[in-house]
């Protein structure tokens, strides 16, 4: 199965869930997020501990034969289409990406217990 195959997005989601589960050993689960190949984790560790944590994350990914780039000590970052101030946990929408909304009267299926994701 290659990139772009019908099941590749689902496999990406499963791998992402597995990685999030493993990252819960290093971070509070409320402080980590992952969307496809973009991830973000927030911690308030001081410099030397933060560097050690970054190395642990790289080591964990390496154990699964995956490569990751870790940037530590950031105060502001862009994650997906949002600019985040990590000191104040304040989000600002990027100007370059207009918001897209689904119209209330659209034929988009409503979430019901039969088509919602399990918790």
Image: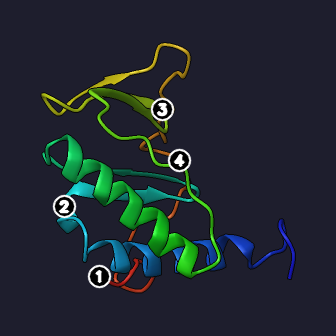
Q: Nearer the viewer, residue 108 or 17?
A: 17
Q: Position of residue 30 (x, y in %)?
A: 18, 61
Circle nearer the N terminus (1, 3): 3
The residue carrying pointer 4 sits among few (fewer than 14), some (14 to 19) or many (20 or more) residues within 10 Å by Cα, namely: few
Q: Nearer the viewer, mark 4 or mark 1?
A: 1
Residue, far front? 48
Q: Position of residue 106 (x, y in %)?
A: 53, 47
| Residue pointed to by mark 3 | 81
| Residue pointed to by mark 4 | 106
Residue 71 to residue 36: above or below: above
| Displayed quadrant of residue 110 | bottom left
Secondary structure state at the residue bearing disc 4 = loop
Q: Position of residue 31 (x, y in %)?
A: 22, 56
| Residue pointed to by mark 2 | 30
Residue 8 to residue 99: above or below: below
The residue carrying pointer 1 sits among few (fewer than 14), some (14 to 19) or many (20 or more) residues within 10 Å by Cα, namely: few
Number of disc labels:
4
Circle nearer the N terminus (1, 2): 2
| Residue pointed to by mark 1 | 119
Say which residue appears at 74% left-offset and 79% top-offset: 7
Q: Quick check: 74 left or right of 66?
A: left
Residue 1 to residue 9: above or below: below
Compute the Cα span from label 4 to label 1. Answer: 26 Å
Secondary structure state at the residue bearing disc 3 = loop
Say which residue appears at 50% left-offset and 64% top-offset: 109
Circle nearer the N terminus (3, 2): 2
Circle nearer the N terminus (2, 4): 2
Say which residue appears at 80% left-offset and 75% top-offset: 6
Circle nearer the N terminus (4, 3): 3
Quadrant occupied by the C terminus:
bottom left
Residue, far top? 95
Q: Nearer the viewer, mark 4 or mark 3?
A: 3
């Amino acid at each position: 199965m290659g990139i772009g195959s019908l099941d590749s997005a689902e496999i990406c989601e499963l791998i992402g869930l597995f990685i999030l589960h493993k990252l819960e050993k290093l971070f509070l689960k409320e402080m980590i997020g992952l969307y496809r190949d973009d991830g973000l984790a927030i911690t308030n560790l001081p410099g030397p501990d933060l560097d050690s944590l970054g190395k642990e994350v790289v080591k964990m990914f390496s154990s699964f034969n995956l490569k990751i780039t870790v940037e530590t000590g950031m105060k502001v970052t862009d994650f997906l289409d949002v600019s985040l101030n990590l000191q104040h946990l304040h989000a600002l929408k990027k100007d370059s990406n207009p918001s897209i909304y689904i119209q209330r009267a659209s034929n988009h299926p409503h979430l019901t217990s039969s088509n919602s994701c399990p918790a």
